[in-house]
Amino acid sequence: MKAALAAAVWSGTMLEGYSPMTQALLGTLFTWGLTAAGAALVFVFSSRQKRILDGSLGFAAGVMLAASYWSLLAPAIDMAEDSGKYGSFAFVPVAVGFTLGAAFVYFADLAMPLLGVGADPHIALALPPESKLAKEKAGEPSFPLSDEEMTIRIDKIENGDVYQRRRGPHSGSSDGQETGSKQQEEVSHAGSSWRRIVLLILAITIHNIPEGLAVGVGFGAIGKTSSATFESARNLAIGIGIQNFPEGLAVSLPLRGSGVSTWKAFWYGQLSGMVEPIAGLLGAFAVVLAEPLLPYALAFAAGAMVYVVVDDIIPEAQVSGNGKLASWTSILGFVVMMSLDVGLG
């Protein structure tokens, strides 16, 4: 990890002479690469090693919280104060942007069922697993599951209810029950397969946009205020890359445990970071063109990241009985990112 961190800092220094758009692209390609590296751990770890995954998720949560303040909110507040437009109300654009960022992720989650997630009984795709309590109430078996028993799991629990849809009633039929012709089964399987892919891409896109956007906005804001420096943007990219490492594993490991092949689990795991370069370019492009929106944009990215941490990552790390471990690794992640931003900034 130390060698990887040193390499990241060195490569980040080499980016200093490039344009904000190029810096944002290369920075988000770096975060995507660490997502793929985390997903590759599926070749090493068993799907039952939840302690490792929960500890990693806790660390990622701490990193994201620290990065949200030192690399996004602090520069946003400085920009609002330095502009002289808001006077004693310089907190307003930051508060508005932060709230809008959280609302964006919230409403994106609400839109998922409207777009088909949780509405189609033939969808069968495993994302990070839900709590053991929810599985016990539903009478479901633990990992590994067969292909027919796979469920869609968006790493989110609201009011104790897990977003989950199983296959249709034919899934629980006895061995001797007729299930239709072979041709009909193949057509049904093909139809559900493409829906699985579409819904997976939708889910991971929504939850990775904030990170890519944050990196892009960070590089686009360089030089706009004393705290919006290249070092701050570089450290933000490194921090998000660090938290993406367990994020890739959080997708690939449950998939492997649900019966998906190791290579397919790795593919879908690294796919979870593919949207970040796109979001990063859009973020950098937007702030370069619309400089007055910078306080809002930085705070928006921070609000989205904090909401993901509080609503998704921390609950997911707590449901398997490793809550204390996840809490302490969160503290460790926060301290590491704070030290990185202050010490190398």
Image (cartoon, rainbow, N blue to C red):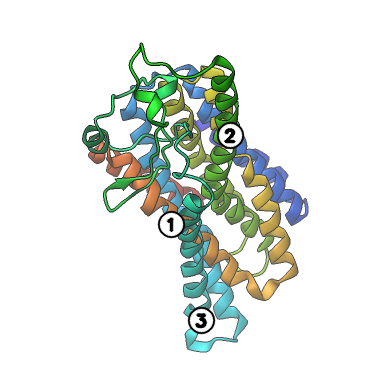
* Amino acid bearing label 3: Ala
Mark sitting on residue 306: 1
Tell me which label, 1 or 2, sits earlier in the chain.
Answer: 2
Q: For the point 61% across and 55% down, which residue is it?
A: 213
Residue 256: image quadrant is top left
Task: Using the image as rendered, state which of residue 169 and residue 47 is in the foreground.
Answer: 169
Mark sitting on residue 27: none
Return the x and y of residue 163 as percentages of the image width and height: 38, 44
Residue 82: image quadrant is bottom right
Q: For the point 62% across and 58% down, which residue is it?
A: 218
Tell which tag, 1 or 3, sits nearer the viewer.
1
Tell which tag, 1 or 2, sits nearer the viewer.
2
Query: Does residue 113 lie above or below 144 as drawn?
Result: below
Tell me which label, 1 or 3, sits earlier in the chain.
Answer: 3
Find out whether the residues at labels 1 and 2 contact each other: C-beta distance under 8 Å.
Answer: no
In this figure, which residue is indicated by the disc labeled 2?
197
Q: For the point 36% across and 11% down, which residue is it?
A: 176
Classify mark 2: residues with Cα within 10 Å, few (<14), some (14-19) or many (20+): few
